[in-house]
């Protein structure tokens, strides 16, 4: 594999994947295609942006003509597709933009790849990065999501991701497109946009703002450090079996309220605040509509077949994350003010 297109590389997970590929594989040419929506921030990649094997392309995957042209120009040996609308709360207020980017955008990419790869499909690869939320919610504590768990998406976000997964499999079955899919649990770590639980709580604790816990805080998520996800994507991209799906997860379940309390304790220690002071900021607020109760991944297939295991214990990963936010308060200020978008808009104008 020489020329790889990574979509959504300016976002949270995408930026860690781009960095990993650019630095680990200097012989690869990495193209980061990103529309730079509110969630895309090139600041995330400033440390590698001058690398000779890194290239940024600003563009929207909803624009089929643009994608067709890009694939004719570059061909690409492989695609790692992460670009998406990713926040459940936004999908509840604006489902259609999730259909456009996550469903139409994915089909546009598959079509653009199919057109230029058609005479030699077998030597190419389309890797689609998806979520465990396509499997719905769990109630029985002994149950976990497996690769063959029936799809049961329950939010507009997860419905759009499930639909994109189905299209990827349909292109594999119908057109023999070589594909891989991975479904990962909740990620956390540096560069996470502060609309999601962990970075929002860090931001609000820092600024002494209320910590909004939905419902009773009893919902459970399975958290994985983002660099472990990027490593899993690397492993699957290089060693996964054509047409297969791999679940990725941390075996690390937390109720939201326990997680927020742990964050409060960690931040009190780091900020030299008196024990228990940040916890007083917790406020129970109206529950999310259709709030999934529990997600939990069984990642045995990935472990047994490809040898991947998470590397970090949660306490260590969370501390690393908090330290990053404390050392990068200007990043947090920029994304909450939106300043980063104007800066890079000017920088990339006309490219
Ligand atoms: P993110 O919202 O942080 O980043 C998404 C990126 O995609 C942004 O850079 C954005 O500018 C770009 N983008 C959005 N619409 C686009 C479009 N129409 N054209 C081109 N670029 C566009 O998302 P994330 O949390 O990094 O998630 C990345 C992928 O991983 C998504 O596909 C998501 O479904 C999946 N995933 C996320 C998690 C998680 O916990 N965050 C877990 C499992 C899977
Ligand atoms: P989130 O980070 O949005 O990820 P997802 O919904 O994709 O799992 O939310 C994680 C959990 O935290 C989820 O159960 C909703 C809850 N939550 C809150 O309680 N308060 C908040 O302000 C946010 C953003 C999320």
Image (cartoon, rainbow, N blue to C red):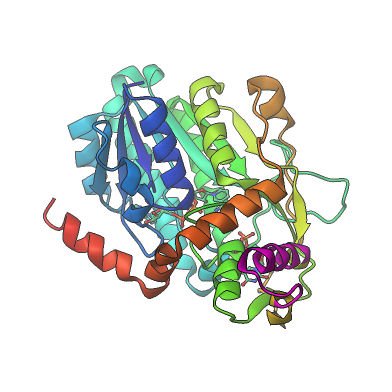
Magenta segment, principal secondary structure? helix
Residue 249 lies, with reference to residue 304, above or below; the image says below
Q: Could you tell me which residue is drawn at 87 percent across and 51 percent down?
A: 141
For the question of whether residue 328 can be seen, the reply is yes
- Left or right: residue 27 versus residue 270 is left
Please state the extent of the stretch shown in magenta in the rendering: 258-277
Image quadrant assignment for residue 2: top left
Relative to 333, residue 238 above or below: above
- Image side of residue 308 versus residue 51, left or right: right
Find out whether residue 248 is within the magenta segment. no
Quarter the N terminus occupies:
top left
Q: Residue at x 60, y 42 (%)?
A: 183
Q: Residue furthest left?
A: 350
Find out whether residue 266 is within the magenta segment. Answer: yes
Residue 217 placement, left or right of 86: right
In depth, the one of 178 and 292 nearer the eye is 292
Give the residue displayed 51% in from the left and 60% down from the top. 325
Left or right: 234 with respect to 78? right
Q: Position of residue 139 (x, y in %)?
A: 84, 56
**Residue 107 spot, x, y in % from top left:** 40, 45
Residue 143 lies in quadrant: top right
**Hey, which quadrant is residue 47 in on the image?**
top left
Q: Is residue 343 above or below residue 246?
A: below
Residue 311 point in image, percent of width and height: 65, 35
Asked if residue 187 can be seen in this view, the reply is no
């Amino acid at each position: 594999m020489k020329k790889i297109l990574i979509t959504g590389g300016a976002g949270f997970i995408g930026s860690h994947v781009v960095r990993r590929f650019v630095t680990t594989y200097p012989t690869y040419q990495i193209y980061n295609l990103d529309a730079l929506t509110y969630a895309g921030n090139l600041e995330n990649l400033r440390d590698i942006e001058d690398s000779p094997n890194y290239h940024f392309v600003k563009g929207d995957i909803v624009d089929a003509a643009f994608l067709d042209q890009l694939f004719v120009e570059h061909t690409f040996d492989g695609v790692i597709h992460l670009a998406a609308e990713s926040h459940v709360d936004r999908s509840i207020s604006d489902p259609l933009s999730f259909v456009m980017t996550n469903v139409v955008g994915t089909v546009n990419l598959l079509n653009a790849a199919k057109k230029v790869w058609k005479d030699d499909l077998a030597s190419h690869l389309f890797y689609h990065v998806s979520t465990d939320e396509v499997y719905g919610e769990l109630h029985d504590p002994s149950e976990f999501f497996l690769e063959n768990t029936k799809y049961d998406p329950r939010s507009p976000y997860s419905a759009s991701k499930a639909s994109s997964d189905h299209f990827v499999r349909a292109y594999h079955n119908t057109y023999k497109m070589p594909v891989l899919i991975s479904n990962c649990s909740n990620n956390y770590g540096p560069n996470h946009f502060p609309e999601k639980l962990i970075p929002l709580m860090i931001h609000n604790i820092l600024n002494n703002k209320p910590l909004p816990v939905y419902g009773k805080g009893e919902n459970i998520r399975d958290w994985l450090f983002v660099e472990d996800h990027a490593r899993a994507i690397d492993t699957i991209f290089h060693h996964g079996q054509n047409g297969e799906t791999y679940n990725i997860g941390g075996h690390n379940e937390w109720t939201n309220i326990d997680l927020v309390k742990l964050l409060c304790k960690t931040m009190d220690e780091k900020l030299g605040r008196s024990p228990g002071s940040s916890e007083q900021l917790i406020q129970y607020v109206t529950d999310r509509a259709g709030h999934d109760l529990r997600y939990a991944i069984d990642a045995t297939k990935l472990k047994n077949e490809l040898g991947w295991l998470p590397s970090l214990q949660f306490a260590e990963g969370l501390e690393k994350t908090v330290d990053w936010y404390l050392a990068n308060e200007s990043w947090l200020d920029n994304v909450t003010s939106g300043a980063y978008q104007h800066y890079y808009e000017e920088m990339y104008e006309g490219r």
